[in-house]
Amino acid sequence: METSDLAKTIKRSKIFAFFLIVAIPATYLIWFYFINKQGFSTDSSMWGTFGDFVGGLLNPLIALLAFYWLTQSVLIQKTELSETQNVLRETEKAQREQALTQEKKRFEDTFFSLLNQLNAVHSGLSERLIVRDIPQASEISRLHSTVIKNGTGNSLDQRVTKMRESSSDTSHYFRVLYHILKFILQHSKFSAEPVKFNVAITKDVSPTEKFYSNIVRSFLNKDVIQLLAINCIVDDPENDFYKYRQLVERYSLLEHLHIDKEWQEELFQRYDKSAFGERVGIKS
């Protein structure tokens, strides 16, 4: 009930109660004194009886009004309590939404900061130095030549060994990429506390994870994807690169991989098919 309506109801009840208190004695006065021409008695006992009679009429009416306002006050309190609870629920909901927005902003700030770092490292590794007016191959091109182009006839395990031995200058790039993927996995729910890796990796890929991992994948060129495929070949769960492999498979980072037919079938067998996304096979 609105405050204005409540005030009007109280005012009407006061007027009604005052009317009853005045009207009942006035009715008796008019009936006995003016109509029946009966004077006022000087016997105090009769006045006492009359008072008891009037009181017997007024008391139930007053009690009825009191009970009415008691029930009204209870209803009013219940209404106010319900409204207060609704306000608290709305406030709590708004606070949760605000907290979620803040956590999402914090996530995106960190994500794009890491992505910028990844691009900066890649730019440095892709830079071609000029020595005696002769352009030199970039760091990442030399690694690609060693592991991919000049690895004809080598098995995948031999390529992995070459990758480990020759990637000291480029390892920072792949470490940053790993931390970005791990960050997406553990923080994509926009919660203050990160989800443990071993718990999160068993869950289905959420639309949020898919969205941000696709952004990362769009920054990986052909050479990087080929090197990444070699870098994460590992079968031992205790190996330091095993979690990296799990992330590559989870986010289908090899979906746009193009390699020679010579070793594509062997590579396809070393990864779960989820690593290649929607592709049925690997084309050269």
Image: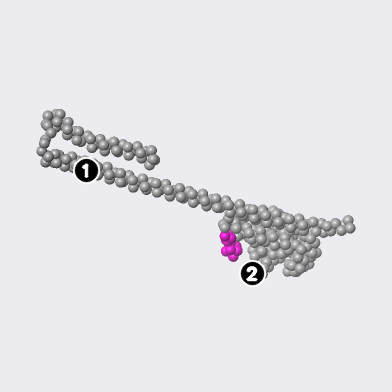
Verify whether residue 11 appears in magenta. Answer: no
Q: Nearer the viewer, mark 1 or mark 2?
A: 1
Q: Amino acid at mark 1?
A: Asn
Q: Amino acid at mark 2?
A: Pro
Cα separation, mark 1 vs mark 2, equals 88 Å
For the C terminus, which image quadrant?
bottom right
**Which one is in front, 4 or 97?**
4
Q: Position of residue 263 (x, y in %)?
A: 74, 64
Residue positioned most to the right: 132
**Which one is in front, 182 or 223?**
182
Above or below, 28 relative to 252:
above
Residue identifier under label 2: 237
Q: Look at the image and give the residue range highlighted in magenta.
A: 193-204
Q: Position of residue 171 (x, y in %)?
A: 73, 63
Count neighbours of disc 1 (C-alpha within 10 A) and say few if under 14, some if 14 to 19, many if 20 or more.
few
Q: Secondary structure at mark 2?
A: loop
Residue positioned most to the left: 43
Can you tell which quarter of the image residue 3 is in? top left
Q: Residue at x 67, y 66 (%)?
A: 241
Q: Residue at x 24, y 42 (%)?
A: 62
Residue identifier under label 1: 59
Above or below, 30 relative to 211:
above
